[in-house]
Amino acid sequence: MVIYKSFSLLTTQYNDLIRITDEIEKAVAESGIKNGIVTVITKHTTTGITVNESLECLESDIDTFLKRLVPEDYPYVHARMLRSYGSTAGNPTGHLKAHLTGNHCVFPIVNSEMVKGDAQDVYFCEFDGPAKRTISISILGE
Amino acid sequence: MVIYKSFSLLTTQYNDLIRITDEIEKAVAESGIKNGIVTVITKHTTTGITVNESLECLESDIDTFLKRLVPEDYPYVHARMLRSYGSTAGNPTGHLKAHLTGNHCVFPIVNSEMVKGDAQDVYFCEFDGPAKRTISISILGE
Amino acid sequence: MVIYKSFSLLTTQYNDLIRITDEIEKAVAESGIKNGIVTVITKHTTTGITVNESLECLESDIDTFLKRLVPEDYPYVHARMLRSYGSTAGNPTGHLKAHLTGNHCVFPIVNSEMVKGDAQDVYFCEFDGPAKRTISISILGE
């Protein structure tokens, strides 16, 4: 059995970490799939999906860490007039943070529940907001 | 068909790379699934799963590399008294190394065997040990 | 239903980003699978698979970014005579860039099409070329 769902969210910050575990668990519960896997994928290239502990201090450290590795003040090439855009590209840091973070996660489903560790939460990572963003959820199993 | 297995290991170092390819290949062989995929997922947020060549010198380089990007000596926010813990959080570097590394891998199964390149091994990455750690293996296919 | 395919390519540069979206979409179309997921996995440990926007300026920024985090001029341990190789290992940077990049991606399949965002393309990342490289595609679904 295969169930596909997607949902959108409006981010409000330039860079933000937004917990989406509840949305995924709801999709798993509604899917009727008892055993299998759930994959969660962002549809954007200046965003990420990551799994970490849900603590404000840690969200702050991840944000600071990515800004340290990918500083705003750097002579990026993807920061000039792009004919295909009709404007100046202004989000090289978002693309590079996405490269480091990855764009998906996967979890097992056992007895109709997503199997995750006690400290694990799924985060949608906004690296070029505010924006409307869409996340795909694919559930496979029996 | 869906098979779920998990196994635990006791890590002995603060940071360590532990080859788990054999455990995964054993799970694939025992699953009875001939064609499909196997996904391997850590249940922790200060650990990772990665795929690389199994060489001691390379394990050392990965360890040094992550310590260079995520130094112990840095004013992290996740390093103070946390009421929810009842103690001082001391593992910001583990969470950030986990962010860079990722928490899962996936391989094809063809003719009852995990398809991997000659140099590919699966590593469990400990970033806050020693600890008891649990790894999920989900096998889907026919 | 499970379909497995692989294809090879000859890379021509030491470091290169090669768009492979068309090959994946072709495999999905030929699979006959209407709903499911497609996973794309490199078989090598000095390469990566990533998803980002297909723009030359961005490819250049990713290349420069990885070279900044993983400089060629550094005292790596995996850079000396290896008896198992019969030669000096010369590719520590490739292995470390692979660690940061990841070795696979996954996308949903809905109504016989790979579901991806408008800006998303799949890249094979060469970090130790030129070389012959092989990529696995596993398609699961109905």
Image (tube, coloured by chain):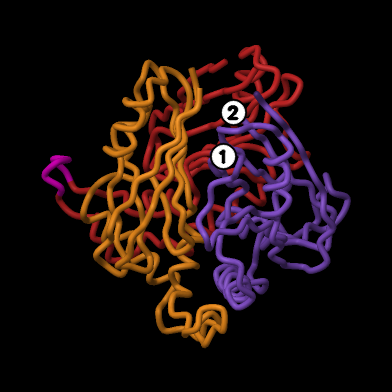
Chain colours: A orange, B red, C purple
Residue occupying image coordinates x 53% and y 32%: B40
Name the element at disc 1. Answer: strand
User: Both on one chain, marks 1 and 2?
Assistant: yes
> Residue C96: in sight, yes or no?
no
Residue A52 placement (x, y as % from top left): 34, 45
- The circle on residue C109 is 1
Residue beneath label 2, please? C141
Residue C71 placement (x, y as % from top left): 62, 72
Examine the image and state in which quarter residue B109 appears. Answer: top right
Q: From what the image shows, is residue C3 above or below residue C59?
A: above
Q: Chain of mark 2?
A: C
Residue C51 placement (x, y as % from top left): 57, 57
Q: Chain of mark 1?
A: C
Q: Please name whichever residue, C121 or B22, is drawn nearer the observer in this view of the structure.
A: C121
Q: Is residue B85 magenta?
A: yes
- Which mark sits nearer the N-terminus, 1 or 2? 1
Extreme residue in the front direction: C111
Label 2 packing within 10 angstroms: few (<14), some (14-19), many (20+): many
Residue occupying image coordinates x 61% and y 72%: C55
Q: From what the image shows, is residue B96 above or below residue B108?
A: below
Do labels 1 and 2 touch, CB within 8 Å? yes
Q: Please name whichever residue, B122 or B132, is drawn nearer the observer in this view of the structure.
A: B122
Q: Is residue C68 magenta?
A: no
Q: CA distance from mark 1 to mark 2?
A: 8 Å
Q: Please name whichever residue, B133 or C130, is drawn nearer the observer in this view of the structure.
A: C130
**Residue interval drawn in magenta:** B82-87
Amino acid type, label 2 = Gly
